[in-house]
Image (cartoon, rainbow, N blue to C red):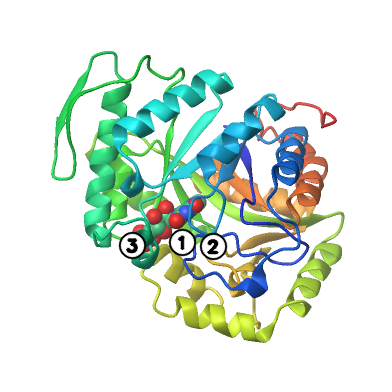
């Protein structure tokens, strides 16, 4: 079995320190990066990801960042084979329009779209989009949305009657080719059955391997009940260097650069997080800079000032490859990685870790690094 490796498009900005590229409705300006997410800069990141051999780039959704559909569409002609894992919110778009946008994207890009369905873990941010449902209602709507999306992509006009959508003759001018796989994240009790019944790939933020294995088992059980199989992906930052000491020195520098007030403000911001996934991420460090290596080579320091994905694989290239192999053995097939800054860290990973994974037979393809 082999793994798929994806990178991340920092559409809220990038920098040498930790930048909050999460879905927070009230991101702290002290964690804004020094590199603005201009088309020029995002092109550099996308081309670095492509050159470093990544399959795709996750592109977040939220009021804090650039729109994922428009930004990735602008990057289509500036890249050649990179796929775009576009995050979007069912609550903010009709399923028929989303189906049409995905179909167009596939034709414009030559089939390079993947979709990340974001139910939304922050009611305040949802309300910014005019969505006043509670989280359980949002997951129920997401389940209907995913059915409606697939139905609209079928050959025949599609009728659907649910609690949240009623569609008559939904269709697009032609179905997308290929039909984009649906990625899905969410750790709430209400999320897991929806993942089992409707997701192609279930995504988790980077918890320690044992916790990830437990989540995988839970989603698998729901999938089996629905007569389906689901793939699993994990979202992690990475700091990989020629030696372990060099990688950990980067974390020390990052910690030294953090404003203690920003750390305290982030801890306060997430103390009562509505998102279960966010709560689990914050619990890994509990606002303290002590004991941040929570499992071998797994550092919880990113979450001190960043919402969402808060952990990083830190170590030598061999150690990082070991941890990837370990998560893969636990059931993870897709790795959505990132690192600060996203251009430089893409090369560290592509030149350092990727050849090791290839030698171990963990990558199905082994494209030589090409110049961007
Ligand atoms: N939520 C966003 O608002 N924007 C995003 O870009 C986004 N990307 C995510 C990426 C991954 C890998 C994961 C695991 C989650 C992401 N989420 C994002 C959040 C979830 O999609 C979910 O809607 C939210 O966290 C609620 O989850 P909960 O069930 O854990 O409370």
Q: Which mark is residue 90?
A: none
Label 2 residue near ligand 1, CB within 8 Å: no
Q: Foreground mark, 1 or 3?
A: 3
Position of residue 43 measured from the top left corner of the image (x, y, whole percent): 72, 39
Label 3 residue near ligand 1, CB within 8 Å: no
Q: Earlier in the sequence, mark 1 or mark 3?
A: 3
Q: Looking at the rendering, in which quadrant would you find the N terminus? A: top right
Q: Which mark is residue 127?
A: 3
The residue labelled by disc 2 is 208
User: Where ligand 1 lies, by quadrant?
Assistant: bottom left
The residue labelled by disc 1 is 211
Position of residue 79 measured from the top left corner of the image (x, y, whole percent): 70, 28
Residue at the image position 33 percent from the left and 22 percent from the top:
153
Identify the element where label 3 is drawn: helix
Q: Nearer the viewer, residue 322 or 92?
A: 92
The image shows residue 210, relative to residue 235, as above or below, that is below
Residue at the image position 55 percent from the left and 21 percent from the top:
108
Q: Are marks 2 and 1 in contact (CB under 8 Å)?
A: yes
On the question of residue 288 being in view, the answer is: no
Residue at the image position 31 percent from the left and 28 percent from the top:
150
Q: Is residue 281 left or right of residue 120?
A: right
Q: Foreground mark, 3 or 2?
A: 3
């Amino acid at each position: 079995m082999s793994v798929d490796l994806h990178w991340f498009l920092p559409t809220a900005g990038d920098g040498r320190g930790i930048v909050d590229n999460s879905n927070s409705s009230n991101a702290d300006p002290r964690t804004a990066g020094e590199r603005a997410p201009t088309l020029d800069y995002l092109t550099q990141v996308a081309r670095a990801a492509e050159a470093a051999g990544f399959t795709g780039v996750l592109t977040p959704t939220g009021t804090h960042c650039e729109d994922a559909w428009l930004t990735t569409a602008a990057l289509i002609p500036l890249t050649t084979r990179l796929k775009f894992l576009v995050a979007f919110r069912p609550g903010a778009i009709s399923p028929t329009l989303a189906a049409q946008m995905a179909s167009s994207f596939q034709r414009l890009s030559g089939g390079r779209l993947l979709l990340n369905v974001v139910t939304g873990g922050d009611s305040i941010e949802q309300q910014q989009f005019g969505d006043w449902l509670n989280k359980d209602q949002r997951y129920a709507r997401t389940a209907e949305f995913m059915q409606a999306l697939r139905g609209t992509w079928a050959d025949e006009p599609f009728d659907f009657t649910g609690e949240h959508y009623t569609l008559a003759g939904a269709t697009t001018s032609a179905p997308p080719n290929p039909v984009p796989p649906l990625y899905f994240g969410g750790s709430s009790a209400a999320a897991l059955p929806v993942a089992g019944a409707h997701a192609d790939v279930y995504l988790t933020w980077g918890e320690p391997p044992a916790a990830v294995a437990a989540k995988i088992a839970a989603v698998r059980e729901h999938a089996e009940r629905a007569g389906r199989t689901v793939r699993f992906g994990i979202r992690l930052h990475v700091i990989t260097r020629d030696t372990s000491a060099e990688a950990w020195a980067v974390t020390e520098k990052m910690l030294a650069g953090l404003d203690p007030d920003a750390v305290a403000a982030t801890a306060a911001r997430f103390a009562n997080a509505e998102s279960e996934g966010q709560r689990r991420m914050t619990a890994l460090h509990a606002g303290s800079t002590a004991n941040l290596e929570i499992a071998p080579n797994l550092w919880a320091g990113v979450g001190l000032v960043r919402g969402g994905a808060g952990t990083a694989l830190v170590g030598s290239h061999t150690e990082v490859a070991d941890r990837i192999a370990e998560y893969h053995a636990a059931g993870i097939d897709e790795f959505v990685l990132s690192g600060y800054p996203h251009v430089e860290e893409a090369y560290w990973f592509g030149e350092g870790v990727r050849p090791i994974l290839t030698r171990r037979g963990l990558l199905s393809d082994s494209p030589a690094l090409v110049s961007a």
